[in-house]
Amino acid sequence: MADLSCSPLPGPALAEADLIAFFLPMHTATRLFQQVVDRVRELNPRAHLCGYGLYAPLNDALLRRAGVSTVIGGEFEQGLRDLARRLSVTREGERPYRQPEPLISMARQQFLVPDRSGLPPLGAYAQLRIEDATRRVGYTEASRGCKHLCRHCPVVPVYRGLFRIVQADVVLEDIRRQVAAGAEHITFGDPDFFNGPGHAMAIVEALHREWPRLSYDVTIKVEHLLRHRDLLPVLKETGCLFVTTAVESLDDAVLEKLAKGHTRAGFEEALRTMRTVGLPLAPTFIPFTPWTTLAGYREFLRALVGLDLVDQIAPVQLAIRLLLPEGSLLLELPEIRAIIQPFDARSLCYRWQNADPRLDALCLSIQETIKRAERRWQSRREIFRKIWDLAEAGEFPVDAPMVSRTTIPYLTEPWYC
């Protein structure tokens, strides 16, 4: 096992392998696959290549062209095991028949505890920054998939409104092993921790009983924060430090296009509720969409100041551009089909341009500004002011509320695709 995001290709192991499987859970991982697959085939031209994970079935044709023989999405473990067993009994010289495993499986599984041996130590990954200290972070999932059908989400084309739980004893043992390896904080990678609130709360309550000092963070939709607001104090009491929520936009018309299931007013209510509980909210946004206007982006920045969110948002969230991967439900919208260019296999998306070219130029300028500023370790508020000026959003409010940066926990690697 090797994590190519932070370690080199394991050449000798690859050269000897009969099966080489690439885990493709997200866009970034799939781009990394593109960078290394030719080298892998050079090292071992006889190996059977497999791509599995959320982005594998979405990019089935691309993977096949790259030499991948088996593509598995959804609940992939059974398919991987069956593939490995089938290859192990293939007679020498016999060519395995092509892909008997389903491209996407929703079969319920009895999971095994993840084996993380061979991966880099936890210190090689994102750390939690809190006050003037850092904590080592582990990662687990209590569930996969999602009940909801947000149009821009890459989970939806694969799971189609279904979600599957990971058995609680498996999740807790996974955490137990990571704590033994030095984890002081756990990130739950569920697309929405409250898809199954009973299952989720039982896990964090058990977590807190066994490790009272262990903290964690989760991702929860705005509508679930409102529907299950009675559970928020329990999150706080059991060690949750912050909740990530995919707000995406403060424009109700855009939220409707994305089928987010909430409004700006709903988000502001959720924000007030979270602040009453004393649980920080970490909103994510897609501020640059085909529907974004220059006036709208300026209003977006002003709204963040008015809501006292400047220090709670990773700067990259102010520069994210709508991604249209293969299979996106947004491709069903006539106005999207009218503006997209042919699929770009290199960037793994359909390219588009804003009707106002100033928006595309502004997005690029903001992205470059953020890169430079973060290399200089500038604070979120300093970067925000630079973005404010680039957008020519007007005079910055002198009395704008600003929360101290160090009081809000955050991961050193911001969450996004």
Image (cartoon, grey):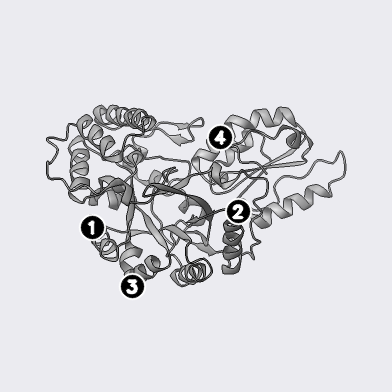
Residue at mark 1: 268
- What is the three-letter code of the residue carrying label 4? Leu
- What is the three-letter code of the residue carrying label 2? Ala
Choose mark 3 or mark 2, whichever is in front.
Answer: 2
What is the CA distance from the residue labelled 2 to the residue labelled 1?
39 Å
What is the CA distance from the residue labelled 4 to the residue labelled 2?
27 Å
In the image, what residue occupies the spot 60% across and 68% down? Answer: 169
Which disc is residue 181 wearing? Answer: 2
Q: Is residue 146 left or right of residue 122?
A: left
Circle 1 residues within 10 Å: few <14, some 14–19, many ≥20 = some
Give how far across and how far down residue 257 sits, in percent: 30, 49
Q: Is residue 329 visible?
A: no
Q: Secondary structure at mark 2?
A: loop
Which disc is residue 32 wearing? Answer: 4
Q: Is residue 318 visible?
A: yes
Tell me the quarter of the image containing the N terminus. top right
What is the CA distance from the residue labelled 4 to the residue labelled 1?
37 Å
What is the CA distance from the residue labelled 3 to the residue labelled 4?
41 Å
Of residues 85 and 401, the one drawn nearer to the viewer in this rendering: 401
Q: Is residue 336 left or right of residue 147?
A: left
Residue at mark 3: 230
Say if mark 3 contacts mark 2, CB within 8 Å: no
In the image, what residue occupies the spot 36% across and 59% down? Answer: 221
Q: Secondary structure at mark 3?
A: helix
